[in-house]
Image (tube, rainbow, N blue to C red):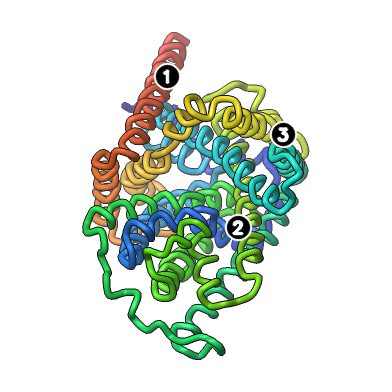
Amino acid sequence: MSNSSTTTETPPSRPDDAALSHGLKQRHLSMIALGGVIGAGLFVGSGAGIAAAGPSIVVAYTLSGLLVMLVMRMLGEMSAAHPSSGSFSAHAERAIGPWAGFTAGWAFWVLLCTAVGLEGIGAAQIVHGWLPGTPEWAWVALFMVVFCGTNLAAVKNFGEFEFWFAALKVGAISLFLVLGVLAITGVLPGTDSPGASHLSDFLPNGGNGLIIGLLASVFAYGGLETVTIAAAESENPVKGVASAVRTAMWRIALFYIGSMAVIVTLVPWDSPEVVEKGPYVAALDELGIPGAGQLMNVVVLVALLSAMNANIYGASRIGYSLVERGQGPKALGRVSGGVPRVAVLVSSLFGFGCVLLSYWRPDDVFSWLLNMIGAVILVVWIFVAVSQLRLRRQLEREAPEKLVVRMWGFPWLTWVALAGMAAVFVLMAREPDTRVQLYSTGAMTLALAAVGYARQRRRSAAGGHG
């Protein structure tokens, strides 16, 4: 056990952070934190959740939002104490062992790279709808080249892109909330307040509908972790991550739970438009605002492009950090101009490969890949919680001054979060659609853990002989 702790314990001034640029400003980090919350999953994916859960989708988003707040607080505590571009992967290695860092890191890398491809496909479909004569693959290729290019340049370019993308998303959703509240209160000209008429059938599909809504909401929150990866490249990593995590609560409450409440109050939950057009477009159409649908499509396009940009960034930094810790091919660790350019290129190529698979093998290889990453975010959250349980005790003993951000109600709320994650796994096993994802993600996680453990044993044996 002592041998494991000596191999995983690393000084706070990590070599990976020293090699990378520190070009992200506080305003970049704040907007990355905000923008990470507002993804395409919220704008588009929430429609299926509303169709299943009805008005109780507000309860589903509140429950999963509370779980995410706890995870972010734990991650914030560890990232403020040990800022690292490896984020939870580096914390898992420090707390549990190299195999855990390897497993969490590479599983998340596959998730981010695949997500880049999915977002590219979604964005291309929107533009193809505007310009039907143009091929979708050409748009995907263009987006991949643009965001691979921005990430190959200085990190401040990535930060600047994300700043303006996030500003547009925040502005759009804030305007939506204001218009929605005005309509609900009967103040908006030309609209009649629906009152609580759409909320009377609160649980239309019973507990089962709520469970489907809950599972949809859990995965809509993915993307928040990017801010703890980006914090390592900010001007003041400790202050940056502390500030971003502390504002997570009101962001989640306002953007997710608030907008779900507005939508189900304005639009009948069983309206086919909620799924066909997306819940936000359906709500704006209900208000009779001209051109609202196309405007929302622009916002969804921006959300998809923003996620592509952020996921190429996150994947390259996670990959780079793994290599720096001896957990991957050394070529990925090359840094020039403060940017891990090989890691950026490989992450982008993997994403583009996913796009090609979606055209060539949509029914087998691509669907298998989607199932494989279906529950990765939950696996990552479990590693976060277990790492925090172990590292908090160590920090209290060895460096209490580093506890700039503290997990609430430690250790009880950490255990509550773990119980919540276990409950989500059980719910996934009950639903046929999510059961396949659970088993596929489980198989990938076990395979990575086996490889990681074998590598750890081999390195340990080599070190022992030396």
Which of the two marks, 2 or 3, is nearer to us in this view? 2
Q: Where does residue 188 sit, x and y in percent of width and height? A: 54, 87
- Residue at the spot x=28%, y=57% of the render? 210
Image quadrant where residue 161 sits: bottom right
Residue behind mark 1: 451
Image quadrant for the N terminus? top left
Find numbered disc 3 in the image and state the secondary structure of the residue it sits on.
helix
User: The disc labelled 1 sits on which kind of residue?
Assistant: Val
The residue lying toward the viewer, choosing from 255 and 66, is: 255
Q: Where does residue 236 sit, x and y in percent of width and height? A: 62, 56
The alpha-carbon separation of the residues under discs 2 and 3 comes to 29 Å
Location of residue 259 with respect to 275 vertically, above or below: below
Q: Are marks 2 and 3 in contact (CB under 8 Å)?
A: no
Residue behind mark 2: 300
Residue 238, visible in the rendered structure: no
Find numbered disc 1 in the image and state the secondary structure of the residue it sits on.
helix
User: The disc labelled 2 sits on which kind of residue?
Assistant: Val
Q: Where does residue 454 sit, x and y in percent of width and height? A: 40, 16
- Residue at the spot x=26%, y=38% of the render? 429
User: The disc labelled 3 sits on which kind of residue?
Assistant: Arg
Residue behind mark 3: 341
The alpha-carbon separation of the residues under discs 1 and 2 comes to 39 Å
The residue lying toward the viewer, choosing from 203 and 214, is: 203
Q: Where does residue 150 sit, x and y in percent of width and height? A: 75, 45
With 115 as the anchor, is 18 left or right in this view?
right
Find numbered disc 2 in the image and state the secondary structure of the residue it sits on.
helix
Tell me which numbered mark, 1 or 3, is placed earlier along the sequence: 3
Mark 2 Cα shell of 10 Å, populated few (<14), some (14-19), many (≥20): many
